[in-house]
Image (cartoon, rainbow, N blue to C red):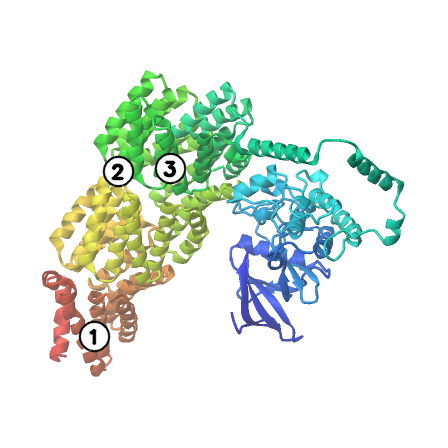
Amino acid sequence: MIGVTISHYRILEQLGEGGMGVVYLAEDTTLGRRVAMKFLSSTTREYRARFLREARAVSALSHPNIATVFEYGETSAGQPYIVMELIKGQPLNDKLQEGSLPLPEAVRIVSHIAEALGEAHRQGVVHRDVKPSNVIITDRGQVKVLDFGLVKQLQEQHSLGGDPNQVTLPSTRTRSDVIVGTPLYLSPEQATGKKVDGRSDLFALGVVLYECITGQAAFSGASVIEIGAQVIHVTPLVPSKLNERIPRELDRITMKAIEKKVETRYQTADELIEDLHQLLPTLDRDGYRKGRSTAALSNPSTHSASALTTITDTFRRPGPSLGTFVVAILAVALAIWGLTRWWKPAAYKPTPLAREWYDKGTDALRNGAFLQATKALEQSIASDPKFVLAHARLAEAWNELDYADKAKDEMLKAQPLGESPSQLPRLDALYLEAIHATITREYPAAIKAYSELVRQSPSDPRVYVDLGRAYEKDDQIKKAIESYVEATNRAPQYATAFLRVAILYGRQTDQPGAYAAFDKAETLYQADANYEGQAEVAYQRGYLLNQMGKAAEARQHLQRSLELARTTENEYQQVKTLLKLGDVETDMGNVAEGRQHMQEALDLAQAKGIDNLTKRGLVDIGNTYVASGNYDEAEKYFKQSLDLSQRQKDPRNSARAWLVLGSLAERQNTPDQAVSYVNQALPFYQQGGYRKEMMQALHLLARAKVQKGDNQVAEQSFNEAIKLSQFLGDDSTACLAHEDVGLLFIREGRYPESISHFEESYKLAKSLGNKKNLGLSLTDRANALWRMGRYAEARAALSEASAIAERPDAAKHLSSLYYVAMARLALSERRFPEAQANAQKALDLAGSQVKSAVIAATFTIGTVLAFSGAPRQGLIKCQEAVELARQSGDPFLVSEALLALGEVMAQNGDTQGALKNSLESQEVFAQAGKQDSEWLAWLVAARASRSAGDTQKAQEYATRAQDLLSGLQQKWGTDNYNFYLNRPDVQFSRKQLSEFIAGKP
């Protein structure tokens, strides 16, 4: 941007970055003044709209204490900007680094800030981020309030649109569910997500005033939640307790400004300004009240004289000696010190009924029955609203159900509820610490707290399960298993521990261990007549069996789980079981039945308000359409899930929807769209520490890089994904990563290396029972093998893949790629009828969805036609393939289609077209290092040049082709090279090349 001129502003240097944009120093070339220009960082429609609303709101403000906005607009590329007054001076937060300000200066500064806010409020604008760093004291001492970037229009209607002409969202939150404002200066209504108005700004200004006169923040804490809890529950010390120079009237003004209740706070900025203006003349420049004048002292009031006389008389009366008086004072002081040092209030004990419901709720949490947990814990709180741990556990349950708002609110209620965590019993304080760390995804801290709980309560099996859950969330699966097993050792009748360890044994593909643990858990639940526990065991068995490819057995267990869930009227369990039954039916080829189960789940979830499963169900139904190749319908369901998640301010499910949309776009060979979608999800996963999801997002971005031809970066990303997935024990992601590395190596002609990755992918897919990935691994391995002429091995792989790919219920993505592999293998053997038949099958299956298959099948048919006596029809087909490839933006697909077109043009006698297309493809092959295709491109160019009469170029191109062909021996090894030379199509091309080298016409 430096040096660029936009409108009549020339950008000179970057000043800073933050919030929604980047700020530059610029010169107004018309007026010759220096200004600040702020540019929007995000290019999403929503943030762009918010940026423009900000500009329009602030441009309406005109006040000497508000930084002026001169202009706002958009660049030619559509990037919005604001041109603002350039303020030179010292930020108030820098002045406060030195401690409190002299009281007159503090009052004067705060008065000016209040005047700025008063003007904004009269114009219907709330700042919402009043803090010292947003206040500048200029070199002339003028106060300027900056960055109304978090403003909102008052008295406007709710809007979810992205139109800059629409009204602003009347919410204290952004669409990403982030509280707007800086935590230390949040008002109670902002901290609890309630409606805000100008009085929230006055609260924040009161906090600024408090800091200016005391040198200390009014609220503090180690985390946003702790600060928020103080804002809601804690009243700070009056300022004069921290600075004895502060008069009582300034105490009153400050404490009124930071009243918790909105209605008892200052109602307008003018009220605050009036009180400050009345106070200011009574303060001397050192910060004291001004003393009374000499005249006043020489004529004291009667009341004052009486008071003085009373004190004098008291000292004149007979009484205890001075020594006795001093000893008495010391004794009292010592007693007070002893009480504060050793006496502590009795630990709070919840009511028996609250404890009973609490135990039921925490057991449900450990079993994964999160909705049940919320109901039990709400009963506990209803019985005893001051039960801290019940609030904390309820926050944990809401967090598991993706209700971030409810989780935050409950955690705020739990901390501190009138007492500091240090006043809680030690075990309760540790639990509170562990739960807080779990909700904020600080799993190492949670593990540390639970480990200490284990040390202090070594005989309690529930603590081991809690520790195991923390390890599990931190992806430390082996340690989680150890903790669960220890729980079973401590309590052999504890069904929950056996259930948890069974699930993890299954994830580790320890099937015997999983089966044994499931059996034990089921037996224990049956003995207790716990039908919900039995239903969960049946569900988890079905889940595992489906992962292993045993769909029929999985269906039986899931149906039993559904029956039990209906018996107990557990709607949450019914919904998740119906969704999984839908998955199983779809995997078995019963797509209609699968969707029927999922729709039933969706209807029940919507009727019962189970929002997180509603969003998940929409994605699951969309995935069934992906499997059947109906990408348009899949996109509709994914976007429904996204819309619902955004309306409910659910960032986790919003990110999930963005991710599946990105995956769909990548599958459709639209890499730019894929990158755009994935980049919407990635920040949430990165900031929240969601390692698996972050890895999936980065994996998709790497795939998009491949489609755009950035192979080196993609390879590095895939290899990192393999290492991370191995560390996390995530075989599913490792399987996909190995597959993608193999496909990348095919693009680079590194076939021997690719085969090892396909073999690893095959092993992982087989252990997971994932038939689709198994079929893809076999098909892609065959593609690498036939390219080197290893036909017997290629056919063996395709034969095994056929059992999956040729099934009527097979995924179209897999089947179309399988038939493309069959077609291209046959074409390389110059078996043209077979190649054409298989290519046509691939086209029929791919439709318009599997673009890579469509492109490859189309140029394969074109090549067959050209070499089978129909060169004109072949030319049309190859031209169609090139057009489709260019639309995809994938350089690999473009280069393969161009090479085929060049060959067909040479066959048609179009020497110029053959030369142009073959040389264009050669450049791409050279960049990718794909020698086996590049030498063929040089050969076509040589043939075209000779036909055009340019024998010198023809000889040059032929020599390059020969050198590249010979170089394959070193690249692949002698055995693979010899297999390659025996390919029928390679023999045909080598014969032409030999004639060139020999100088034959």
- Name the residue nearer the viewer: 295 or 404: 295
Q: Residues within 10 Å of mark 1 (few under 14, many from 20)?
A: many
Q: Secondary structure at mark 3?
A: helix
- The residue labelled by disc 3 is 470
Q: Residues within 10 Å of mark 2 (few under 14, many from 20)?
A: some
Residue 909 versus residue 427 in the image, above or below: below
Name the N-terminal-most of marks 3 and 2. 3
Give percent across and percent down for residue 578: 38, 30
Q: Amino acid at mark 2?
A: Gln
> Is the residue under label 1 in contact with that under label 3 (CB below 8 Å)?
no
| Residue 509 placement: quadrant | top left
Q: Residue at x 29, y 34 (%)?
A: 481
| Residue 502 placement: quadrant | top left
- Name the residue nearer the viewer: 607 or 329: 329
- The residue labelled by disc 2 is 508
Q: Is residue 631 left or right of residue 73?
A: left
Name the N-terminal-most of marks 2 and 1. 2
- The residue labelled by disc 1 is 943
Query: Can you tell which of label 3 and label 2 is closer to the viewer?
Result: 3
